[in-house]
Image (cartoon, grey):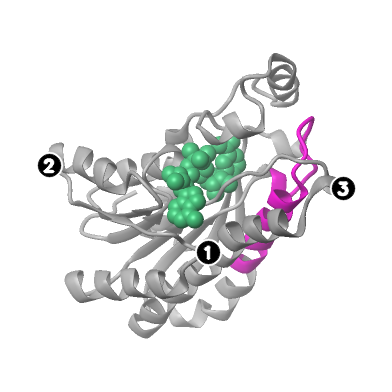
Amino acid sequence: MNLKEKVIVVTGGARGIGEAVAAVVCANGGKVVIADLKGADETAARLRAENYAAEGFQLDVTDSAAIDALIDGVVARYGRIDGLVANAAFANSNPMLDHSDAEWRSVMAVNLDGVFYSVRAAGRHMVNAKSGSVVVISSIAGVKAVRPEVHAAYDVSKAAVAHLARVVGVEWAKSGVRVNAVGPGYTGTEMLTAVGITNPEIMATWLEDIPTGRLLQPVQIANVVAFLLSDASSAINAQLIMADSGYSSF
Ligand SMILES: NC(=O)c1ccc[n+]([C@@H]2O[C@H](COP(=O)([O-])OP(=O)(O)OC[C@H]3O[C@@H](n4cnc5c(N)ncnc54)[C@H](O)[C@@H]3O)[C@@H](O)[C@H]2O)c1
C-alpha cells in the first residue's frame, strides 16, 4: 500500500470513512486534499499536526464548477493528481411512496451527480497523464435490498456509482487509469445515525444479518480504498470490491 508522494483527493473526507481514508493515505506516504461541505480544514489541520501533508477545502460536490476548480488547483499546485476517492454522500430514510421529487433529486445530486463531476474532473488530468486510480464509494445497499430501513433513492444512487466505475474503468483502461468501486457494509459513522443506529430494533436486525455480528470500523474500509489507490492493486480495474464482512453473500 505504498502511496509515497501520491497526491490523492478525497471528497467527503472531513469525517467518517473519508476521514479514515485521508489518514491511511497520509500514513502510507501520500499527500491528501480533503474536500467537504464542512470540517475539511479542521480534519486537514489535525493531519498536519501529525506532520502529514494535508489540505482542506470547503466544497459542495453538487457544484461541478467548484469540483473542476478544486482538481485544476491541485494539479496546478502539485503538478499532478494520482488518486481520487469519490466518497461524499448522504443517506435518506423513507419508504418509496413517501419519496418526493425533491428528495429523489437531492440524493441523486450528491450521491450520483457529485461522483460523476468528481470522476470527470480528475479523469481529464489522469487520462492526459496516462496514470491514476479512481475509487468511488458504493454500498451493500447498491447490490441488495438491505433491511429493515428503506431508502430507495440512496440504494439506486449506490448501484449507479458502481456501474459508473465499471464502464469508465473499461473506457479508460488503455489510458492507464483504473476506476474501481468499494462497497462498504454497515460501518460505525454518523451516517448510520440517519438510518437507525440509535434504534435498538434496527441495530439488532443489522447485527443479525452481518455474518461477523458486528459493525465495521472506518479504517477497515479505508485500508481497502488505499490498496486500490496503490500500485499493488494494478490488476484490479472496473470492479466493485465489497468490504462488507460477507453481508452481500448472505
Ligand atoms: N457508514 C456506512 O455504514 C456506509 C455503508 C456503505 C456505504 N457507505 C458510504 O461511505 C461513504 C462515506 O460515508 P460515511 O459513513 O463516512 O458518512 P458520513 O456522513 O460520516 O460522512 C460523509 C461526509 O460527506 C460529506 N458530504 C455530504 N454531502 C456532501 C456534499 N454535497 N459535498 C461535499 N461533502 C459532502 C459530509 O459532510 C461528511 O463529512 C458514503 O459514500 C456512504 O454512502 C457508508
Q: Is residue 250 above or below residue 66?
A: above
Q: CA distance from mark 3 to mark 1?
A: 25 Å
Circles 3, 1 touching at the beta carbon (< 8 Å)? no
Query: Is 65 situated left or right of 93 in this image?
Result: left
* Residue highlighted by disc 1: 114
Q: Residue at x 76, y 33 (%)?
A: 149
Label 3, ligand 1: CB separation under 8 Å: no
Q: Which quadrant is home to the C terminus?
A: top right
Query: Within the magenta stretch, is there residue 80?
Result: no
Foreground: disc 3 or disc 1: 3
Task: Tell me, for residue 31, which label it has, or none.
Answer: none
Report the number of numbered marks. 3
Q: Which residue is mark 3?
A: 97
How far apart marks 2 and 3 lie (CA) works out to: 50 Å
Q: Magenta segment, principal secondary structure?
A: helix
- Magenta span contains residue 153: yes
Label 2: state its secondary structure. Answer: loop
The x, y position of residue 92, in whole percent, is 67, 44
Which residue is found at the position 63% from the left and 57% from the top?
A: 106
Q: Is residue 189 visible?
A: yes
Q: Give the residue number, with chain letter if any, for mark 2.
A: 51
2 or 3: tag closer to the N-terminus:
2
- Which element is circle 3 on? helix
Q: Earlier in the sequence, mark 2 or mark 1?
A: 2
Q: Type of residue at label 1?
A: Gly
CA distance for labels 2 and 1: 30 Å
64 or 161: nearer the viewer? 64
- The range drawn in magenta is 141-165
| Residue type at the position of mark 2 | Asn
Q: Identify the residue at horizontal 40%, vertical 69% (top origin).
A: 67
Residue behind label 1 places its C-beta within 8 angstroms of ligand 1: yes
Q: Where does residue 101 sit, x and y in percent of width and height?
A: 75, 59
